Amino acid sequence: MAQAEEAAWAGVLTHVIDASHLATGEQLSSVVDAAVRALGLTAEVLLVDLAERVLTPIGREPGPAVDVVGTLPGRAYQHAEILSGTDEHGRVLWLPLLDGTDRVGVLRIGLGAGASVGDGPWLRRRLWTLSGLMGHVVMAKVPHSDRLRRWRSNGPLSPPAELLWHILPPRTFATERVVVSALLQPAREVAGDAYDYDVREDVVELAVFDALGHDIRAGLTTVSALTAVRNARRDGVRDLAAVADRADAFIGAQPGRLQFATAVLARFDTTTGVLHYLLAGHPPPLLLRAGKIVKELTAPPRLPLGVTRFGGSAAGARGVVAREQLEPGDRLLLYSDGITEARDARGEFFGEQRLVEFTEHAAADELSAPETLRRLGAAVLEHQDGRLQDDATLLLLDWYTAGHLRIFPTLPPDEDPEGRPRGR
């Protein structure tokens, strides 16, 4: 019995891999559904939008979107857990859909009366493997599918937002040493904010940008800053001041009126815990330790990137590359002023104190890094009655050796199809 079931699941994975080569983005639900039908199961892929508010079924004729908040599939997405329930078709399992460690949606598995394997550890572990495969496949199709992009944006993007989302890295990346997660809002209209990171074996590079303005010129300035920083990094430039100089010169070389971008550039060593950082006219990062904000990283800043061409003081332009020793379990939060300066109807700022309190509460609740940012972004949006007046960016570094485990489901010990524990 066990050998037959294992062979059947090998066939499922083989079907998905082989069929996905020639499948279009909107055909992927059909591909995985056809793969599991032989086992009496059904399957459907739901893609989360960039604002992380709704989950949209993908298909030639997609069904209605499902809210992330207040629904069972939304809970599976938020908490990265495999959850069971029922719908109009019977018993179902909801699985988080990850591209690596970046949350991209959920996978719905229908457990029909004719299913050859019942819900249990054996099935859940194999479905988790299937959802991981589908997460990779779905995101590999996004660059080539306007329909997937449309579902992912939940509506049309503004030209500056279209430009930025094309070049940004995934919102979450994790290793066994560190988790890096980002949030960018408003997802469909963002213009001048952006984030970037690079993760090597023992070094993490971080950057947050906020360009002057809220139009296509702001987007172009941000793209220029981000591109120059990446170019310097890939050229082997390690001095953060020299990296900033590269961006400063590139922005300053562009024709036209004054354009500049504030920024934070940082490099973190996951082996020693040493953080080097440089402020370029940007709000200072916050350091969270043992669930509490313990300090702002307030090294003397340099001028914003691009200002020196327009009369900025070259002598005072480079700022100070500061050093901070982090401890295991620390979190580092980088943000733009669109977070703290978000105003409600009375003109009251969201403010740094609310940011601090929310971040501390999220740590106390042991939320994963991406879920912390999703909820924080929702709180900022609610403060403004659902309409952001400015771009808002968050980038969270979680130096915690078990941080990546919060992104994955809790899987029970493996069993054979008849419920007998297999062991490891």
Image (cartoon, rainbow, N blue to C red):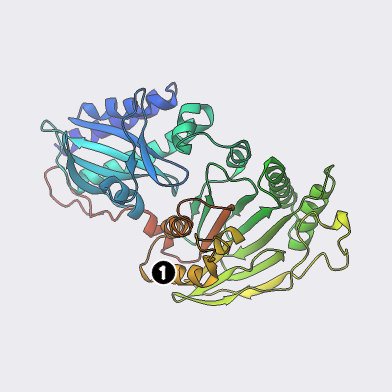
| Quadrant location of the C terminus in the rendered image | bottom left
Q: Is residue 279 left or right of residue 98?
A: right
Q: Identify which residue is drawn at 52% across, 45% down.
A: 187
Vertical side of 358 occupied by 212: above or below: above
Place residue 392 in its image quadrant. Answer: bottom right
Place residue 206 in its image quadrant. Answer: bottom right
Q: Position of residue 106 (x, y in %)?
A: 34, 42
Q: Is residue 15 left or right of residue 415?
A: right
Q: Is residue 63 left or right of residue 179?
A: left
Q: Is residue 43 left or right of residue 149?
A: left
Please state which of residues 209 and 131 is positioned toward the viewer in this rendering.
209
Q: Position of residue 290 (x, y in %)?
A: 45, 77
Would residue 15 be seen by someone viewing this image from the given angle?
Answer: no
Q: Identify which residue is drawn at 50% across, 61% down.
A: 344
Element on which disc 1 rests: helix
Residue on which disc 1 sits: 363
Q: Identify which residue is drawn at 82% across, 46% down.
A: 257
Of the residues shown, which amino acid type is indicated by label 1?
Ala
Vertical side of 278 occupied by 70: above or below: above
Would residue 277 be seen by someone viewing this image from the given angle?
Answer: yes
Q: Position of residue 235 (x, y in %)?
A: 75, 49
Q: Position of residue 360 (x, y in %)?
A: 44, 71
